Image: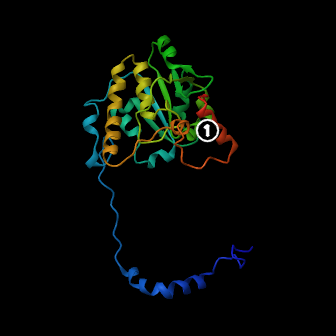
């Protein structure tokens, strides 16, 4: 195959590459290979909020874990573990360990996760995932009197969709959703729409509904507000939702060539629920 200039497009072999490096500019770099390599040490991390100790958010967490009857199962996509500004550690720090259980993975079956399978078959278990078949959580909470278990998927919207539809266990619990009445306060990360919430925000709203206690939402949101405030004070920018950027002509990225993705963006602009 020919290259752009009309000559051969083949990559230079090892011998050619070595010769190029050893001549010309390469001669002045020989001493660099002998310099000592500095080891990069990670900053000490707080054991409770999982933030670096210098920016610990524990002062904004409740002094004691909240007393709740609802148990949360957070199904976390593996990619979320490496994100710096995660919200799940803050959520877990607000609740007793036995009320917030985190499972990391993409695929969950009964053989590998027998406890989760039992939970999914429990008639009191709910899974928080929006859709045409989902019931508003407020309606379910009115009828529920016994302690419930709620499953929440933690990941981007595409990751959450993949986990929900490719794991049959997650179709067993009753599917519920939150009314799109509040805007996300997680302003340092871009959301698809103005009413898309982070995992911590979803849990805060859901727990306040299930426990019939509005103060739970305020307490759990407090460390998230502190996190965003700190980041904004140190150079972070407010991230408007993709919906906001498209509607106001501020979306500066190339439009997708994929017809399905392009259609989704058109629906966002036209206020169509997707």
Q: Position of residue 174 (x, y in %)?
A: 57, 22
Quadrant the C terminus occupies: top right
Quarter assignment of residue 217: top left
Task: Using the image as rendered, state which of residue 210 and residue 178 is in the foreground.
Answer: 178
Of residue 31 and residue 120, the one placed in the foreground of this image is 31
- Give the image's coloring scheme: rainbow
- Is 250 displayed left or right of 51 in the figure? right
Numbered disc total = 1
Q: Is residue 184 left or right of residue 136?
A: left
**What x and y, as percent, mark residue 111?**
59, 38
Find residue 228 and report its horizontal and vertical position in percent.
Answer: 35, 40
Question: Which quadrant holds the N terminus?
Answer: bottom right
Query: In the rendered image of this protein, does residue 214 appear above or below residue 194?
Result: above
In this picture, residue 203 sits left or right of residue 248? left
**Residue 95 visible in the picture:** no
Mark 1, other Cα within 10 Å: few <14 / some 14–19 / many ≥20: some
Task: Look at the numbered disc 1 and give the secondary structure of its residue.
Answer: helix
Q: Nearer the viewer, residue 120 or 89?
A: 89
Look at the picture and state if 38 lies above or below 92: below
In the rendered image, the residue lying farthest to the right is 1
Q: Is residue 157 above or below residue 253?
A: above
Q: Quadrant of residue 14?
A: bottom right
Query: Could you tell me if residue 49 is visible in this image?
Result: yes
Residue furthest to the front? 249
Q: Which residue position holds label 1?
A: 265
Say which residue appears at 57% left-offset and 82% top-offset: 17
Q: At x 62% / y 22%, what residue is drawn?
A: 133
Residue 175 percent across, percent down from the top left:
57, 24
């Amino acid at each position: 195959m020919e290259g752009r200039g009309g000559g051969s497009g083949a990559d230079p072999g090892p011998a050619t590459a070595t010769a190029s490096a050893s001549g010309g500019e390469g001669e002045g770099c020989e001493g660099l290979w002998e310099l000592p390599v500095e080891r990069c040490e990670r900053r000490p991390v707080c054991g409770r909020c999982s933030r670096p100790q210098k920016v610990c958010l524990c002062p904004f967490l409740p002094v004691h874990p909240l007393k709740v009857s609802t148990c949360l199962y957070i199904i976390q996509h593996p990619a979320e573990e490496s994100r710096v500004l995660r919200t799940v550690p803050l959520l877990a720090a607000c609740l007793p360990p036995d009320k917030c259980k985190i499972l990391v993975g993409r695929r969950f079956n009964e053989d590998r996760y027998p406890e989760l399978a039992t939970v999914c078959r429990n008639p009191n278990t709910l899974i928080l995932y929006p859709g045409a078949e989902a019931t508003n959580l407020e309606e379910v909470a009115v009828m529920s009197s016994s302690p419930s278990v709620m499953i929440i998927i933690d990941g981007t919207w595409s990751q959450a969709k993949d986990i929900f539809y490719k794991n049959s266990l997650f179709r067993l619990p009753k599917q519920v959703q939150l009314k799109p009445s509040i805007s996300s306060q997680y302003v340092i990360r871009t959301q698809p729409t103005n009413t898309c919430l982070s995992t911590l925000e979803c849990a805060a709203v859901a727990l306040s509904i299930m426990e019939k206690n509005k103060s739970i939402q305020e307490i759990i949101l407090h460390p998230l507000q502190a996190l965003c405030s700190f980041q904004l004070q140190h150079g972070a920018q407010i991230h408007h939702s993709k919906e906001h950027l498209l509607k106001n002509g501020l979306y500066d990225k190339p439009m997708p060539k994929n017809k399905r993705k392009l259609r989704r963006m058109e629906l966002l602009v036209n206020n169509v629920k997707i």
